[in-house]
Every structure is written in C-alpha cells, then in structure tokens.
Image (cartoon, rainbow, N blue to C red):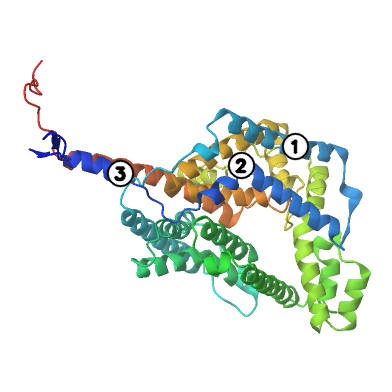
C-alpha cells in the first residue's frame, strides 16, 4: 500500500521495516565525542609534545646529572629509533585518508549491551584478581608498606592473568558510558563503572605503588576530555592545577613514608634524596639537601623543595638510565620480543608447560629505575628495533583513524598508545604491570566487540521480514 503525494496523486510507498532499520543504523551517534580533540592528538603529536615537555623539564632542572654514561653510540641509536617512528607516522598519514575526512560510524549494537557486558567482565576480572592476590598468594595489609609487599607469595596464577586482562574493562565501560552520555539514564551502571575503573588505583595504593594511580588518573583525564565529560575539571586550569598539586604532594609523602619506614636512612629524607638509586643518575644539589637537613625537613619552603626534588628525580633520571643501560648491556642475548610481548608469552608458557623467559636485568639493565622506552627496545630487539619503530608509528597512525571511525571499539586502545608516546622518555607504560594488562585487555575488548557486533547484525537481519515480491517480478525460487 502506498500514500498519495501532494503532487499529482503519485504514490509514495511507506518505508519497509528493513528500510527503517537501515535508517536507524545510519543515524548520528556519539553525542559526546569531541572529534576535534581526538583528531588533533595524533601519535606523532603526542610523541613530539612529550619530547618537548621532557626536554624543558630536564634543561631547567636544578638536579646534577651524571654525564659519564652518555655515549655517541647510544645517542645515535635513540635518534634512529625516533626518526623511524616519525617516519612511519608520516608514511601512514600520507598514504591513508586525511584524518579530517574520517567520519564516525554509528554504534554497531545496543549501547546498553556493551556497557553491561564490559561491566560484568570487569567485575569478574576483579574478583579473579582478588582471589589470586588475597587467597592464593596470601596478600595482606601489614604495618609497613615493605611488609605488605613482601606478604605477596608465589607466582601469578591463571586467575591473576585473567583478572589482569579483565580489570581494564572498567575503564572501557566508563568510555562507553561517556561516549553515549548515558550517565543520567544509567546512574547505577555509571557509578559501578567508575568504581571498577578506579580499582587499579586501590590496588596500587595497597602496595604503595604510585604508577597505577598516576596512569589511571591520566587515562581518565584524557578519556573525559575526549568525551566532553567532567567538564568542571578537565576544562578548568585552576581545578587541574589543584588536583595536580594534591597528587604530587601525596606521591612525595608516600615516597617519604615508604623510604623512611624501614629505618635505612638515619638523618632525614634529605639523605634518601642524596643516596637513593636515582641520585646516582640525577642528584639534588648541595644547597637543597643542606636546606632540608637544616630544617629537619619541616616548613613550607622545605616542603616545596622536597616536592621539587622528588618529582624531578623521578622524571629526569630516566634519560641518564637509558645511557647506562646501553653501556651495561652484555650483548649476549636479546629478548627477541619477550619484554614487549611477555604477557601472551607467559600465557603460552603456562598452557604448554614450556620455559619462556627473559630478564633484561641479568644482561645489564638497571633494576628499579625508570628508563626511557628506548632501553626496552634495545634490549628486546637491538638494531631490529629501528624498522619495528617505523612499523609501530605506521600502525599507530592507522589506529588513530580507526579511533575516529569507530570510537566505541578503538578509542580506549588509541588513548593508551598516545599516553605511552607522551611518556616515552620517562618510562614505557606498555610493558610493565598495569600497562601491559591494559594494552592486552583493550585488544581483547576489540575482539569481543567485533564478535558481538557481528552477531548483533546477523540477529537483526534474521529477524527482519523479507521484502515482498513486486508485481510482475519472478518468484524468488524461479531459475
């Protein structure tokens, strides 16, 4: 049946359910996605900004660096790696569609379906993680942070690996909530997603580890900025400055408590600043340590000095450690990918019962120190790291376009990669602890998302009635 149009009685056929489904699928979505922000922060730009910020901090730092480790060979290798990465980004940018022309696709399935699925996976992952740490490995809170860490016994069980992969799904659930602005329609789900996303911070705090807290905070900030969420915070310089100062002060206080609780330093925290492992590469000048000693570490002025030394030691010592790692490498054995792919290789070793292991610390890498990502690349791949850096830059630029084209699937992974680029000269957040689990967890989410989207489309197609045969057309079964 049709309707009469206002022009000459011509019939206009009413939309068939199939056509209505197609129209709904092509409707605009992602009401809160900040396309300009996501497009602007390409992998190359994040890397460049991170390099500039790090260089400014290092050049203006009052710390005294140990230049004896610096060699031309290590400098040339670093230049080759960075040039290859930017070269890969450049080739990918100029051989693919311009990022400004990439448009987001609609959601591939019900938003609620993805949100609740990721919440369930994150919740089960945290349960597995808690079971591994608190039940199987006897983790417990003791009187000191050192004793708390030492209470963790044995190797990570299969529950620990499952939990590590799955607890990053809390951040993914929060991504989906903020992408679709469903926080008002699903307040309970939103609150649960926030708690699940914050779990790594809690786990890090119990072990006095600051990296999970800092990484989670930065990832949530970038995610909120990309989805126009928490605007009262991410768009306010005053609020951001206040939060940043609170975090820096808290981290310094945590470091001071953790360092002095064992009684290894008898004078004051100034002695820790002078003789801690980082001081071998970036030592505070005498006037700062003398001021801390003279006041017994008390007072507002000294508090500023302690925070300054603490944050700058943690940030800037890494470039000197890279040169030390390069000089100390025994060249007997490379990791052949184990450092960057340790998590899946451990799973394979667990399943097959084979011994797959490589420790860079056995071959010369400084243990317990931050180091530029270049150290891991060199110990893992050697000269092969140069073409791999090119491939990594190329792949990241492709991922950037995918994050714009289908944010619900690729945006969390893109944010992780860009964060790693920004942190390149401080540390490699993709290879250790929370970072490795987060990367492989988001990759697992990409696979799950693809499967769910495919099944959803097939289910919707099978439920749609077939189009009626037009008059005079051959039957569907005619040959």
Above or below 333: residue 114: below
User: Label 3, on which residue?
Assistant: 25
Q: Nearer the viewer, residue 84 or 138?
A: 84
Q: Nearer the viewer, residue 418 or 240?
A: 240
Q: Nearer the viewer, mark 3 or mark 1?
A: 3
Within 10 Å of disc 1 (Cα), the crowding (few <14, some 14-19, many 20+) is: few
Instruction: Answer yes or no: is residue 450 visible.
Output: yes
Q: Measured from the top left, where is residue 72 in percent x and y?
A: 87, 38
Local SS, label 3: helix
- Rendered residue at 91%/49% (across/down): 68
Local SS, label 1: loop
Locate the N terminus and report the quarter of the image it occupies: top left
Locate the C terminus and report the quarter of the image it occupies: top left
Above or below 160: residue 344: above
Whichever of callouts 2 and 1 sits on the residue coming sooner in the sequence is 1
Instruction: Say which quarter of the image contains residue 462.
Output: top left
User: Label 1, on which residue?
Assistant: 332
């Amino acid at each position: 049946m049709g309707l009469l149009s206002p022009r000459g009685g011509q019939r206009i056929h009413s939309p068939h359910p199939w056509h209505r489904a197609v129209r709904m699928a092509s409707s605009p979505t992602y009401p809160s996605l900040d396309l300009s922000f996501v497009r602007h922060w390409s992998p190359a730009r994040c890397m460049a900004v991170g390099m500039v910020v790090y260089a400014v901090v290092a050049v203006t730092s009052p710390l005294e660096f140990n230049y004896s480790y610096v060699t031309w060979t290590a400098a040339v290798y670093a230049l080759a790696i960075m040039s290859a990465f930017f070269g890969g980004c450049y080739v990918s940018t100029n051989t693919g569609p311009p990022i400004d022309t990439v448009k987001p696709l609609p959601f591939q399935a019900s938003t609620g379906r993805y949100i609740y699925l990721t919440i369930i996976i994150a919740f089960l992952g945290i349960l597995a993680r808690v079971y591994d740490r608190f039940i199987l490995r006897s983790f417990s809170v003791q009187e000191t942070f050192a004793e708390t860490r030492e209470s963790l016994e044995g190797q990570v069980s299969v529950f620990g690996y499952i939990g590590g992969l799955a607890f990053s799904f809390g951040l993914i659930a929060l991504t989906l909530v903020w992408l679709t602005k469903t926080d008002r329609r699903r307040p309970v789900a939103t609150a649960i997603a926030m708690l699940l996303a914050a779990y790594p911070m809690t786990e890090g705090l119990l072990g006095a580890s600051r990296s999970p807290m800092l990484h989670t905070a930065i990832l949530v900030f970038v995610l909120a900025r990309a989805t126009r969420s928490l605007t009262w915070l991410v768009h306010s310089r005053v609020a951001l400055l206040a939060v940043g100062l609170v975090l820096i002060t808290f981290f310094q206080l945590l470091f001071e408590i953790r360092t002095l609780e064992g009684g290894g330093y008898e004078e004051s925290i100034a002695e820790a600043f002078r003789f801690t492992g980082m001081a071998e590469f970036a030592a505070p000048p005498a006037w700062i340590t003398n001021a801390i000693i003279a006041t017994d570490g008390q007072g507002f002025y000294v508090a500023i000095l302690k925070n300054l030394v603490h944050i700058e030691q943690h940030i800037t010592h890494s470039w000197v450690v890279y040169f030390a790692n390069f000089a100390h490498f025994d060249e007997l054995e490379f990791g052949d990918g184990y450092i960057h792919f340790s998590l899946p290789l451990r799973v394979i070793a667990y399943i097959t019962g084979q011994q797959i292991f490589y420790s860079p610390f056995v071959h010369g890498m400084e243990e317990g120190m931050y180091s530029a990502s270049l150290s891991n690349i060199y110990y893992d791949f050697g000269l092969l790291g140069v073409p791999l850096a090119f491939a990594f830059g190329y792949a990241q630029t492709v991922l950037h376009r995918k994050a714009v084209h289908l944010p619900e699937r690729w945006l969390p992974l893109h944010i992780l990669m860009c964060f790693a680029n920004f942190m390149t000269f401080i540390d490699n957040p993709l290879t250790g602890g929370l970072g490795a689990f987060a990367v492989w967890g988001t990759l697992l989410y990409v696979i799950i998302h693809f499967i769910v989207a495919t099944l959803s489309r097939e289910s919707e197609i099978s439920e749609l009635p077939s189009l009626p045969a037009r008059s005079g057309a051959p039957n569907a079964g005619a040959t």
